[in-house]
Amino acid sequence: MARILRSLAIGAALIAALLLLISGPGTRFGLWEYGSGFLLMRIAFFVGLGAAALALVLLVVPKTRAMGLVTLAVSLVLGLGTAYLPWSGVQKARSLPFIHDISTDTTTPPAFVAVLPLRADAPNPPEYPGEEVASQQRRAYPDIKPLTLAMPADQAFARAEDVAEGMGWEIVAVDPADGRIEATETTFWFGFKDDVVIRVAETTDGSQLDVRSKSRVGKSDVGANAERIRKFLKVMQG
């Protein structure tokens, strides 16, 4: 019986880790929808937690511990590690507002133009949702603001294009006359498509740069769009 329980613990831990590992890539490569990917992560959490609990109980009992210390220790660590990853993701999502459209200018946000056909089937519409989202953004991400640069608009525009390319974004459109750059970034794990529009405008002292980043799917971006804008602005200032 002890041997069976030990095998069950390590087997469950391995299955949980496998489910977690395939949840994102399976979505990215079109094997299933993102909802199924999230379901696999949820299952991985419970299976991993169960494996860790069983391993802990067997480790506490001297007889079963002596028969498979290493296997049970691996089961405990692997199960807890697998359960922790989806749990931490949920905790982060709960700590942030359920929004997915972030802009440095929430009054007159940059508008998408060239990416509109790419978003035709996206659940999240391209239009800015308005003050309800803007107020949540200001509370959660007060640092997301327009960037003022002491350089002419044409130089700021060229630099913005270089930075966007350097960050690995897929450039969709570059319109110097309109001061607009549009791009798409694909997230690493699930392969989510998030669209970005950059607006560069001339000012009396140089130029002002605004960035808007919006997810195509999902009610919450878990802070991804705000972090993307932060990184872009930081490089622009460097």
Image: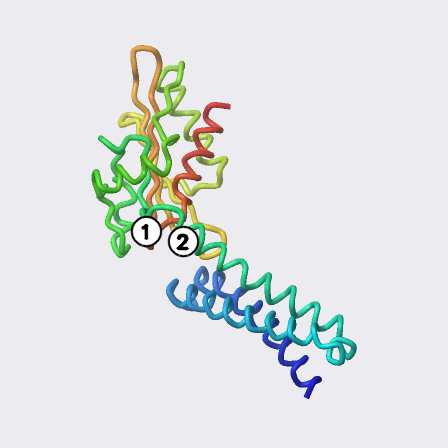
Residue at x 53%, y 72% (from the top left corner) = 47
Distance, label 1 to label 2, CA atoms, is: 8 Å
Q: Amino acid at mark 2?
A: Phe
Q: Quadrant of residue 71?
A: bottom right
Instruction: Check the image and name the residue furthest to the front.
Output: 61
Residue at x 51%, y 23% (from the top left corner) = 238
Q: What residue is shown with label 1?
A: 216
Instruction: Check the image and name the residue furthest to the top.
Output: 205
How did the renderer colour the structure? rainbow
**Residue 201 coordinates in the image, percent (x, y):** 30, 22
88 with respect to 173 (left or right):
right
Q: Secondary structure at mark 2?
A: loop
**Residue 156 coordinates in the image, percent (x, y):** 39, 22
N-terminal label among 1 and 2: 2
Whether residues under marks 1 and 2 lie with C-beta atoms below 8 angstroms apart, the answer is yes
- Give 227 or 158, whichever is nearer the viewer: 227
The quadrant of the rendering that contains the N terminus is: bottom right
- Give 213 or 11, whichever is nearer the viewer: 11
Residue at x 35%, y 51% (from the top left corner) = 220
**Residue 230 coordinates in the image, percent (x, y):** 44, 34
Crowding around mark 1 (Cα neighbors within 10 Å: few <14, some 14 to 19, many 20+) is many
Q: What residue is shown with label 2?
A: 192
Q: Amino acid at mark 1?
A: Arg
193 with respect to 118 (left or right):
right
Q: Secondary structure at mark 1?
A: loop
